[in-house]
Image (cartoon, rainbow, N blue to C red):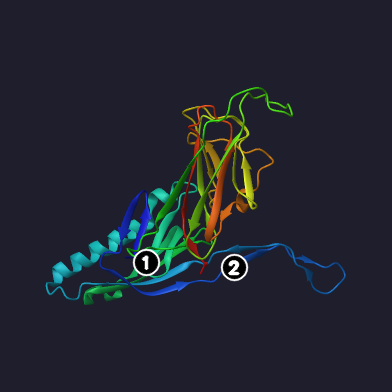
Amino acid sequence: MWSLKYDDTAYSFDHVAVTTVQLEGRSYRVDDTPLPRADGVAPGQDFADPGDIQLKLLLSFQSVRNVFLQRAMLQEAAEAFLAAWDAKSLRHTPGAVGELVIPSLGMFEGRPRRAEWDWSTFGLGYLTGTATFIRTNLSTYVLDGDGVAVWHEATLGLVPSQVGGLKAPLREPLRTSVESTRAAPLTVGGTAEAWGIYELRGPIQSDAQIEVPGRWRLYLNRALGQYQTAQIDTRPGRRGTTLNGKPVQLLDPRSSFLDECSLLPGSNVLALRGSSIEGTASVSVRWLDTKASI
């Protein structure tokens, strides 16, 4: 079912039929440099921007025989669609995005930017219109059989550390516990890389590590208390770290870049390393399956 979701509310396309969908191709920002005193250019790094989604709409109440009721219903439905598409709360919130679900294609993130109706056919009981959705990233999210982009989740706990003497070689900070390691397999669907949201819950000492062995590793630059949760968001356009919901730089410089921390389709292994005497520390990951971008 067609829908536009923001503020945890899904606005369905009641009475509005989409007659045409046009997904514009990618555009590119380039770092090409003209060659001095020579023909041609030296290609630099290219950056892709997703194309917009253009919709052509039809709103019809021609089956309603009462002309006055027909026009009232037509106007009400047209104004309701424009109000939902205007998405005032999104416009007033920097960084906020909506979700557009297109059946059989997928879910796209971005913002509705423009919608209008042609009122020249109002007296005939129908309207045609157009709407534009601006995509904010290249991802196309997979829909399940019910037409929903489903969040997948996995959690990995850390067993209690051994306690004893100091661990050699000695370095700051000195510890009397031995680092533990836990790993678990993850199966990612779709046909393209997925981007996870990782939540590491304490208590755990500093230098804890989250990794997909052989691909990337993230080092925490601080210890976490019993009621502290570090969140690491690797999604394009939302990359960053928070501590108990507040933006804080949590990663050690040794860490991989967040744009390297993807999960590949198929089998993955997620590992948590660190020292936690209590043994109750854990890391969870949530992700949406994606497919090759359109």
Q: Position of residue 223 (x, y in %)?
A: 58, 29
| Image disc number at residue 116 | 1
Quadrant containing the N terminus is bottom left
Q: What element carries label 2?
A: strand
Q: Which residue is drawn at 63% across and 66% down?
A: 28
Question: Based on the displayed image, in which of its 4 quarters is residue 71 positioned?
Answer: bottom left
The residue carrying pointer 2 sits among few (fewer than 14), some (14 to 19) or many (20 or more) residues within 10 Å by Cα, namely few
- Amino acid type indicated by mark 2: Ser
Q: Label 1 neighbourhood size at 10 Å, few (<14), some (14-19), many (20+)?
A: some
Residue 35 seen by the camera: yes
The answer to whether residue 236 shows anywhere in this view is no
Q: Nearer the viewer, residue 186 or 66?
A: 186
**Label disc, if present, on residue 27 of the rendered structure:** 2
Residue at point 48% right, 64% down? 190
Comparing labels 1 and 2, the label whose residue is closer to the camera: 2
Q: Nearer the viewer, residue 68 or 160?
A: 160
Residue 45 falls left or right of residue 225:
right
Q: Which of 207 and 36 is in front in this view?
A: 207
